[in-house]
Image (spheres, helix red, strand yellow):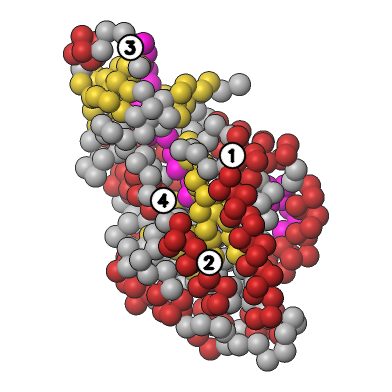
Amino acid sequence: MKIIKAKYILSMDEDFTLLKNMAICFDKKIIDIATHTKLQKKYPDATLFDLKDQILMPGLINSHVHLEFSSNRAELKLGSFVSWLKSVIKSRDQLLAKCGTKCIDEALKYILESGTTTIGAISSFGLDLNMCAISPLNVVYFNEVLGSTPSAVDIIYSDFLQRVQESKKMSSSSFIPAISIHSAYSTHPVLAKKALELAKEEDMVVSTHFMESMSEREWMDKGEGEFKEFFESFLPNSSPMIKPLEYIELFKDIKTLFTHCTKATESEIDAIIEQNGSITHCPRSNRYLGCGRLEIEKLPEFHLATDGLSSNNSLSLWDEMRAALMLHSQAPMQEFSKRLLKSVTLNPAIALGLKKGAIKIGYDSDFILVDIPEGLEDEDDLALSLILGTNRVNTLFINGKKLNRD
Ligand SMILES: [Zn+2]
C-alpha cells in the first residue's frame, strides 16, 4: 500500500476538480483520498511519496493507435486520403518487414515516456501481439478484420478468429482482447456481422473507422468519387456494400468507438450517440490526410487519439492536444484545454469500458506525475499550461506499480 501526497491532484472528474494539499492511498486501486496526516494514521504501514513540485493526475489513454506501421517515416504519401491509401497498399509489406520487435518496443517505450498508461492498439496482422502483452502498458487489443470480396469472407474470418484466439491466450487485467471492424467501405457486411456476433458473445469492446474522408462520403452516398476508380482497379462495377446509417446500426448494443467521423452527417452522429457509441478524434491524422476538421463543438463528448505513425509524426497525446488547440482555433483556450485533458483520460476510459482516467476511490491506480508549470499564478490556466509545457513524464504508476523512466 502506498500514499502519495501532492500539492495538486487533478482528479479529472466531471467538474475538473483540483484537489489541493491532499493525498491518496492506493494499491492496485485507489483506496482512499484525504489529507496525508489522516491517511498516515489510518494506513500506518503504507509507503509515503511526497510530491512538492509535481501534480498527480491520471495516466493518459490513447484509444486508437496502429503500432504495426510504426516504421513509417516518409514512405507514405500524406495530403489526400486516397493517395495515402494507395501508398499504404504499395509500401505495406516493406513497412511491416521494417517494424519488428525492436520497432514496436521503441514505439511502446515512447508512448510510456510521454505519460500514456493505456492504449487501444488496432492490430491488422497480430504482429504486435507479444510486445503488447508483455508491455507494462494497459492494452485493449483490437483484432481488426477487413475484406470486401464475398467469396473470401470465410477464409478472412477464420484468419481473424485465429488472431482473436491467440490474443485471448494473453488475456489479463492489463491486456484485454477486443475487435475492430476496419470500415464500412472495406469490410463486407457479412464479415462485419460475424465479427460483431463474436464481440457480443465474448462481451468485447469494438472499434471502427467511420466517415474519415470526403472520398468515403462520396463513395458511400453515391458510389462515386476517387474510391470508385480505386475499387474498380480491383473489381469492375464495384458499388458500396451498405448504407452509412445501416452500418452504424450493426453496432447497436455493442460498446463501439467510431474513429474520425470528420465527414459524418448530423443524423449519423446522432445515431452513434443514441446507441451509446463514442467518437474518437485524431486531429493530426485528419489534417495530414487532408480529411478536414471534425466539428467537435457539435459533439457532447469525444476522446482524442494519435492514430498510428502511418498518418502521424508522433504517438504523444501532449503533441495531439497541442495540435487540437491549433486546429480548433474557435474554441476558448482555458475551457477547451480542460476538455482536452478529459478527452485523454476519463472520456476514453468510459469509451473502452475501463475504470480508469480519474482519481476516484475504486478506480485503477494509473497515475502520472507532471511538473507544476513554473510561475503559475491563476489555477484556471493550469490545464493550458500543462498542455503547452509537457513532453515527457518521469514517473508513472500503472496498476499501482511505480515505473521510472530509463
Ligand atoms: Zn486508424
Place residue 279 in its image quadrant: bottom left
Q: Tag 3 or tag 2, which sits nearer the N-term?
A: 3
Q: State if disc 4 and disc 2 touch (CB < 8 Å).
A: no
| Label located before the other in sequence (1 or 4) | 1
**Disc 1 target residue:** 133
Q: Which residue is mark 3?
A: 46
Label 1: how many Cα within 10 Å (few below 14, some 14–19, many 20+): many
Tell me: 191 left or right of 232.
Answer: left
Give the CA separation, mark 2 to mark 3: 46 Å
Amino acid on which disc 1 is placed: Ala
Quickly name the residue at label 2. Answer: 195
Mark 3 or 4, nearer chain start: 3
Rendered image: mark on residue 352: 4
Location of residue 100 in the rendering, given as x and y in whole percent from the top left corner? 75, 43
Q: Amino acid at mark 2?
A: Ala
Percent from the top left, x then y, of residue 323? Answer: 49, 49
Residue 170 appears in the rendering: yes
Residue 53 belongs to the span the image colors magenta: yes
SS under mark 4? helix
Amino acid type, mark 4:
Leu
Q: Is residue 86 magenta?
A: no
Q: Would residue 130 be found to the left or right of residue 330 on screen?
A: right
Magenta region: 47-76
Marks 2 and 3: which is nearer the front? 2
> Split into 4 quadrants, where in the image is the N terminus?
top left
User: Gap in Å between the C-alphas at discs 2 and 1?
Assistant: 22 Å
The numbered mark, 1 or 3, whose residue comes first in the sequence reads 3
Tell me the chief SS of the magenta region.
strand
- The label shown at residue 321 is none
Residue under the point 65% across and 65% down: 158
Indicate whether 24 appears above or below 72. Answer: above
Q: Is residue 47 above or below residue 278?
A: above
